[in-house]
Each structure stands twice: as C-alpha cells, then as structure tokens.
Amino acid sequence: MRTPLALLIWLVLLAGTARAGTPCASNLTCQDGDFCNGAERCLAGECAPGPPLDCDDGDPCTRDVCEAAVGCAHIEDACPASCAGQLDGTRCADGTVCTRGDACAGEACVPGPSVACDDGDPCTSEHCDATHGCVYAEEATGPPCVATCDGVVPDYTPCVGDGNMCTLDGCLPSVDLIGNPDICVIGLRSLERQCDDGDVCNGDEFCSPTLGCQHGPPLVCDDGLACNGVEGCDPVLGCRPGTPEPDGTACDDASECTTGDVCGGGVCAGMPLPPSACDDGDAVTTDVCETGFGCLHCRASQLAQLRVRRGRDGDAIKVRGEMPADAAGTFAAAAEPVSLLVEAGATTLFRTTLPAGALTANPAATRFEYRDRKGLLGPVRSLRIQIRSRGLKWSAQTGGGSVASSGVTGIDARLVIGDACFTSSVPCVAKSSGLVCR
C-alpha cells in the first residue's frame, strides 16, 4: 500500500534539523534543539539563525539562566527568604516564581499573586514549576481533544500525537494511513503553534515544547548615536528613525582626538586636535593622538619586517622589531595592557589590544610571552618581548579577518605597553601572496 502524499510531506517537514542556509518549508525543520542560541526560523525558504535569548526577567529576586532544551529559567534566590528585622514592603523570596512580587509583612515573607498558566488548550495540561514558571505537556484534558483516534471521530479532531505541544495534531480516520485509520497525525492541524502577538517590538515569539509560547529578544532600535535622533519602535513596522538634532548641536563623537564636536546632517563630528595638543616638549618622542588612547608620545624603534599573507581562513600578519636598549625600565609587560597598531596614513590596517596580565614572564623577567594559537580570545596568536643587552626584541603574529592593504606603500607600526609607545615607519611592497614591509 502506498503512503499518502500528505503523510510523506509531514514526514519530510518533521525530519530532523537543518543548518543555516539549508532550504526549508517550516521553522520546525530548522531548530537545532538549543533555544539559548536563538530560535532558528525558515525565512524566504532558507533556515536562518535567531538572536540568542535574553533571560533577564527584570526581577531583582531571580537568578536568570538558560537551559538549551527548555529556554529561560529563573531561580528565585537573589533576595533573602527571611524577613526578620526587615521593613514591611521589602522584597523577599519564597523560593518559587509561581508567585511574583513577594514582600515582607510583619517580618514574614508574604507570597505575591500566583501566576496563571491555563492556556485554554484541551490538548495540554499545565502546572507551575518553581524555576521555569508555567510548564506544559501534551495531554488530553477534555473535549474536543482525544487521547487516541479510535472509534468514529471527525477528521481533524484534536488529539495527542507526539508529546510536543508546539505541533497541533489531528485525527484523520477518513484516510487509511498504512493500514491504520486511527493514527493521530502529527501537525495535521498545524505544524507550528501560532505564537505571534502582532508586536514585533517585543521580539519574535516562538514555541517551546515545555514552556509554550515565548517572546524572543526585543528589538533594540537605539543605535547610540545622539545626532540622528532617538529611534523608536512601531509594533507593526519595527524600528523607526528618530528626528535628527539641529546642525550645530553639541555632541560627543567618542574620540579623544577631536575637539568642538557638533551635529551636522545627523552625524556627530569634531575637528582634529592640533599637533600642539599632544606635544610633550621632548624632541626624542613622536607625538600623535590615537582614538581609544589619546595622546601618545612614541620613541623610535626598528621594524625588521611586517608581512601580510592571504590565507583561506583570513589574512595573517607576522611582524618583528627591536626597541631601544634602555626601554625595559619604561613598562611592565606582565602587568599592563599591550596594543599593536598598524596604520597606513589615516587607514588602520590592524589594531588589537591584549588586557593587562595577558603576557606571562619567565623567572628572570627577561622574556614576556602570550600564546593563543587557536585564536580563542581574539586575532592575536602570539606576542613575545625579549630583553637583551643590545636591545629589546619583539615579535607578534595574528590571524583571521581581512587586512585592507591594497595600494599601501608604507606603514606606521606602533607597540603600546601601558603608557609607553614605540613606533616604526617602513616602506611596503605588494606581492601576489600579500604585503611585505621592511
């Protein structure tokens, strides 16, 4: 006997998960079983990832966590359970999120209102869990839902099929499904429970087989830029632009290297600081202003070579140089942040900072080293500083990303350790494999 076409379609739609970009017909086929990394969706016929869940419920008395197979959970233990010596109205925790807004009264923790969990679906049973709140199970609790499709029931009668409340299952006795007309067909009434509340601002709703309909992360419309106005959210249209501030309105462009910042055409910008603003009066140093650092007073150093290699996994930079012999007393590499900046004029080719304490020293404090070959903490794979009698040698290697080195004829490389800065300027030659500067 042939399997009916309708059943074949359901089997295909329900068969496993798919990676991003995989063709799909339903959100159900795209789910990877981990709600914490976002609810995957079928958009324009392809699986697409969703934004990670934000489990913050705004309640100071709960500790919010995410469980991959369920979604958000809230442990109510962030407020004291005892109200001894506390003023009436002080928040307390009775240990369950099934009551919200617990507060002290007469030195007793009085539970707040109970959470209502009834979803009105006769095919689900519900109860309140102390950490998850309302939880649901697919179970026939009354008509018109049936536990099985045995007997004479109309087509599409709600039934309990797969134990997943997010698929709305139904009976199909008028069709002989593989010799059995009494099968409860998974997703016959709907492959996905409709959770959309019509408000895109509070996030894309999705269905958790345990928690039922849940909100995704709300839209974040504010881009943090003052001059283009305050962005808002429309329940239907989503993020909407704000009204730009008038030209000439004072603002802050977040750069230490500009002054007189004002709005213009919705953009905040200032004039570059004059060279005198960073002049330390020392003829030995080169004074520059770097965004994120402010004024730097850099001593000259030698750059042996900087090489950019194009690779399948991104561009790799290898660079080595030498600092003045007396530089060791100007920094503490094991206790200060270390930054590497590679620039071509006003264009930054590469810029990264290792936090204080990232470099480890040998017992004699003559070698400082950082290693991260897999790039778990960022693009820097290694950085080494060696103190020698004739000078301090350093080398670094980075990987990943793309270095826009087209047309570069020379670079400035700066190594910044704490407040100490060392700079080198060298010419560059473009080669088929990348860029070589020496």
Image (cartoon, rainbow, N blue to C red):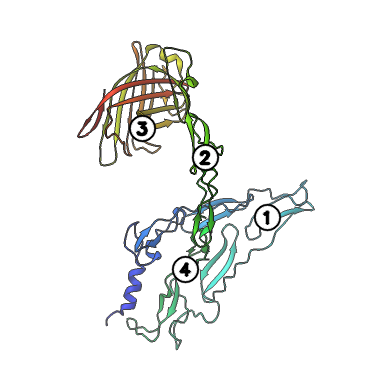
C-alpha span from label 2 to label 3: 24 Å
Q: In which quadrant of the rendered view does residue 110 lie?
A: bottom right
Disc 3 marks which residue?
347
Residue 211 visible in the snapshot: no
Mark nearest the camera among 2 and 4 is 2
Residue indicated by mark 4: 166
Amino acid type of the residue that numbered disc 3 sits on in the rendered structure = Thr
Dot 4 or dot 3: first in sequence order is 4
Q: Secondary structure at mark 4?
A: loop
Alpha carbon of mark 4 to alpha carbon of mark 1: how far? 31 Å
Please state which of residues 42 and 259 is positioned toward the viewer in this rendering. Answer: 259
For residue 32, which numbered disc appears in the image?
none
In the displayed structure, 70 sits above or below 136; it is: above
Measured as percent of width and height from the top left, residue 228 is found at 51, 46
C-alpha separation, residue under disc 2 versus residue under disc 4: 50 Å
Res. 139 visible in picture: yes
Residue carrying label 2:
263
Which residue is drawn at the image coordinates 56% and 39% (left, top)? 249
Indicate which disc, 2 or 3, sits on the residue closer to the N terminus. Answer: 2
Q: Residue at x 66, y 58 (%)?
A: 100
The Cα–Cα distance between marks 1 and 2, rounded to whole angstroms, is 52 Å
Q: Residue 410 appears at what percent x and percent y?
A: 29, 26
In front of the other: 256 or 59? 256
* Residue behind mark 1: 94
What amino acid type is highlighted by mark number 4?
A: Cys
